[in-house]
Image (tube, rainbow, N blue to C red):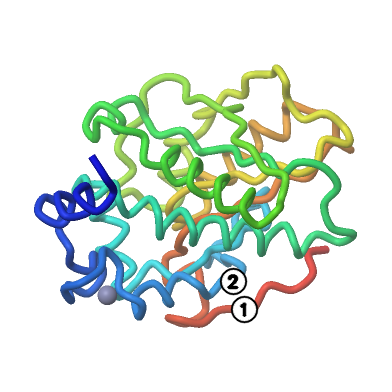
Amino acid sequence: MDGGLLGALADLVLPRTCAGCGVPGAMLCRRCGALLAVPHLATPRRFPEGLPPTVAAGVYAGPVRPALIAFKERGRSELAAPLGTALALAVAAVVSALPGGVAGTVRLVPVPSSAAALRTRGRDHVRELTARAVAELRALGMAADEARLLRRRGRLRDSAGLSAAQRRANLAGTFVADPAPGRRPGEGVFVLVDDVVTSGATLTEAAGALVATGPDDGPPVLAAVVAATPRAAPRYGTGRPVGRLS
Ligand SMILES: [Zn+2]
């Protein structure tokens, strides 16, 4: 079967409306896609101690919200392409802000979803984003790979509707690092990747578990996400530009 026929079939079965604003023609229109090309440092209101420097490609508001929900909860897995590209942009931005740049591989560490969430969705959407982002970064000539160094332990209450403090308690001890291969000195940089950052509690917890896999002077741990909630960014559509991390 040639690509043209496959494309024609895909047009029949896939929704060809923008997942952000609903205009027909593309899975994510140019205008909505542009909202995911504004990398900025995520700054949650109550900045959790231990939150790694985190860059978001866009703000989790307006059309970005339905687009991410369509991908995550409504089975529109084809959105892994534009959303993974956005994640790659956030990774490149947070890595480029490292003083002295990066020597070695940029290792993307997906934040693991809960077993219950994986069962409900029937897929691992963060790993789909990670795979796409790794491919994009490699296409740009960056040495990048996926490093599945974290897993969740035990049961986790659904964090919806919990306060920031409750979320932190809910997440205490959530992640376990698989020590091998861990963070070895001179190994480049580790970037935790997730779809959305809200309070920063999940990334803080994940970073703590990841940092524990290596020595204090081991490779830095950063984070990148597709979008940050408006509370985590100064204003919709804008944000503090990425400067030097210190
Ligand atoms: Zn749109």
The residue labelled by disc 1 is 240
Up the image or down, 31 lies above or below 225; here it is below
Identity of the residue drawn at 41% across and 57% down: 83
Q: Residue at 47%, 21% (x, y): give it.
A: 153
Label 1 SS: loop
User: Quarter holding the N terminus?
Assistant: top left
Answer whether labels 1 and 2 touch (C-beta < 8 Å). yes
Q: Residue at x 26, y 55 (%)?
A: 69
Callout 1 amino acid: Arg
**Residue at the spot x=67%, y=48% of the render?**
50
Q: Residues within 10 Å of mark 1 (few under 14, many from 20)?
A: some
Near-viewer residue (191 or 76): 76
**Label 2 CB-ligand 1 distance < 8 A:** no
In which quadrant of the rendered image does the C terminus lie?
bottom right
* Picture quadrant of ligand 1: bottom left
Which residue is labeled 2 in the image? 40
Q: How many marks?
A: 2
| Relative vertical location of residue 184 with respect to residue 25 in this rendering, above or below | above
Q: Secondary structure at mark 2?
A: strand
- What percent of the width, then of the height, locates residue 36? 45, 70
Q: Count neighbours of disc 2 (C-alpha within 10 A) and say few if under 14, some if 14 to 19, many if 20 or more.
A: many
Question: Marks 1/2: CA distance?
Answer: 5 Å
Res. 205 image quadrant: top right
The answer to which of 131 and 204 lies nearer the viewer is 131
In the image: residue 149, left or right of residue 86? right
Amino acid under disc 2: His
Residue 26 in the image, given as x and y percentages of width and height: 25, 68
Residue 185 rendering spot, x and y as whole percentages? 88, 33
Residue 12 x/y as whole percent: 9, 54
**In terms of sequence position, does the residue under pointer 1 or pointer 2 come before the other?**
2
Is 134 left or right of 171, judged from the image as shown? right
